[in-house]
Image (cartoon, rainbow, N blue to C red):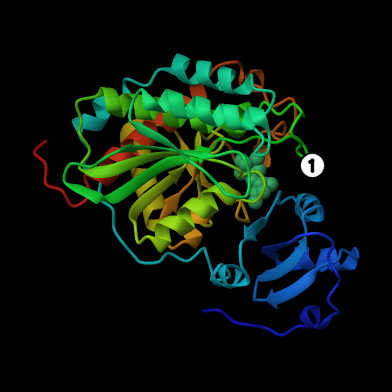
């Protein structure tokens, strides 16, 4: 339940903001720190855990700075309107509905996972890292999105999804379902990269782990499904989101658009950072801003098809695009490469290259297998098949 609290924080004076105001929602303590540091913010609402504030584009950097000081990384959502921001303050960690997902334990998945090729994933990580950056406002960021669209076109109907407020488009490839085309299963990750808090159109941001790894893993899964004899019953969409590193903006627009159009997305898997093996366990299932029933389902899929040790982790904030889908009311899952304490320290720097992960894509192979299992087993939910 939304509980609106009028606090001292709300009663302060409203600062004047230079230039265009950006509306964000962020944690209450982060908003308070901004005020303490005399940042000009327009205080628009204070909820149990979340504050809605308006501030200048430049001051957005301070939000990331404060969140990082608190070991939380970025930790904010950009909103187009105050109304949208208000809707986002519902407790995102709660599942919309309870559902039991059953596994079919099928030869179809067992055959497909054998087809995952480490070299394909590695080569694409290296290729995508060779762009100076994939920043959402840079020419190379736009080129990289076009490149991904071209690659995905070999396997499915791939299109750019343009965004009005910045240059870089998102990319969506579709395999239309043969029986329930109106039901959609999504696999994706962000295609942009950033270096430092400031980013910048010229700075070097290879983003090998964050998140060429997720895009390369997604591409390998798309290749395998499209080249296989398996014809999905539901529609499967592969997504490369623009502008994640600057507030989940690409995925937020897509998920809001899907919600507005009433598109029935039955599940979303986010792949963001799949290739740095920082921990003994292999796959860490994110338990916040995700759907608990589908996360439980992932545990079973790992045991059945991937057969690697796994455990749970928390981001502690809306750290990647799965949160955009959760916010729009959909069920999302987010398997992650390491525990949060053993994460890749080179992300968001010019040192985020594949050699940090041993110059191979061995770890990402597990995520490709899990994604294949998720897509096929989600596709077969409620379907009778003879094994
Ligand atoms: N891949 C990261 C998120 C991440 C980092 C997850 C470390 C788990 C461990 C993502 O690309 C990112 O950087 N997100 C931003 C948040 C966004 C709202 C600006 C972040 O964490 O600062
Ligand atoms: Zn990042």
Left or right for 306, reference 203: left
Is residue 97 visible from the viewing direction of this image? yes
Extreme residue in the left direction: 386
User: Which residue is at a point 43% across and 23% down the rendered structure image?
Assistant: 151
Q: Position of residue 274 (x, y in %)?
A: 53, 32
User: Which residue is at a point 58% across and 49% down the rendered structure image?
Assistant: 164
Crowd rating for badge 1 (residues with CA inside 10 Å; few <14, some 14–19, many 20+): few
Of residues 261 and 194, the one nearer the viewer is 261
Q: Quadrant of residue 141?
A: top right
Q: Position of residue 232 (x, y in %)?
A: 22, 38
Q: Is residue 155 above or below residue 42?
A: above
Q: Is residue 31 above or below residue 102?
A: below
* Residue highlighted by disc 1: 198
Left or right for 293, reference 363: left
| Secondary element at tag 1 | loop
Left or right for 67, reference 340: right
């Amino acid at each position: 339940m939304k509980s609106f609290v009028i606090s001292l924080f709300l009663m302060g004076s409203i600062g004047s903001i230079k230039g265009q105001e950006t509306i964000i929602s962020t944690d209450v303590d982060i908003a308070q720190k901004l005020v303490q540091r005399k940042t000009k913010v327009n205080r628009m609402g204070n909820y149990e855990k979340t504050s809605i504030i308006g501030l200048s584009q430049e001051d957005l950097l301070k939000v990331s700075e404060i969140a990082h000081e608190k070991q939380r990384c970025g930790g904010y959502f950009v909103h187009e309107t105050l109304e949208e921001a208000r809707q986002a303050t519902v407790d995102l960690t709660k599942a919309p509905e309870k559902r039991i997902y059953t596994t079919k334990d099928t030869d179809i998945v067992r055959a497909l996972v054998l087809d995952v090729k480490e070299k394909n994933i590695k080569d694409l990580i290296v290729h995508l890292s060779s762009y100076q950056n994939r920043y959402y406002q840079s020419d190379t960021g736009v080129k990289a999105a076009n490149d991904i669209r071209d690659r995905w076109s070999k396997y499915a109907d791939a299109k750019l999804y343009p965004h009005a407020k910045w240059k870089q488009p998102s990319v969506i490839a579709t395999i239309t379902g043969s029986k329930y085309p109106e039901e959609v299963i999504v696999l994706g990750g962000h295609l942009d990269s950033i270096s430092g808090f400031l980013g910048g159109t010229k700075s070097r941001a290879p983003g090998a782990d964050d998140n060429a790894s997720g895009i390369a893993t997604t591409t390998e899964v798309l290749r395998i499904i499209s080249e296989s004899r398996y014809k999905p019953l539901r529609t499967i969409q592969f997504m490369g989101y623009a502008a994640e590193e600057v507030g989940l903006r690409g995925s937020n627009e897509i998920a809001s658009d899907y919600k507005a159009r009433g598109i029935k997305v039955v599940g979303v898997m986010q792949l963001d950072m799949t290739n740095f093996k920082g921990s003994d366990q292999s796959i860490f299932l994110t338990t916040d801003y995700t759907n608990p029933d589908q996360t439980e389902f992932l545990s079973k899929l790992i045991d059945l098809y991937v057969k690697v040790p796994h455990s749970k982790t928390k981001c502690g904030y809306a750290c990647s695009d799965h949160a955009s889908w959760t916010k729009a009311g959909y069920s999302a899952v987010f398997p992650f490469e390491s525990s949060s304490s053993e994460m890749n320290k080179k992300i968001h720097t010019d040192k985020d290259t594949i050699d940090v992960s041993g110059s191979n894509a061995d770890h990402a192979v597990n995520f490709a297998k899990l994604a294949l299992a998720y897509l096929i087993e989600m596709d077969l939910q409620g379907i009778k098949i003879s094994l």
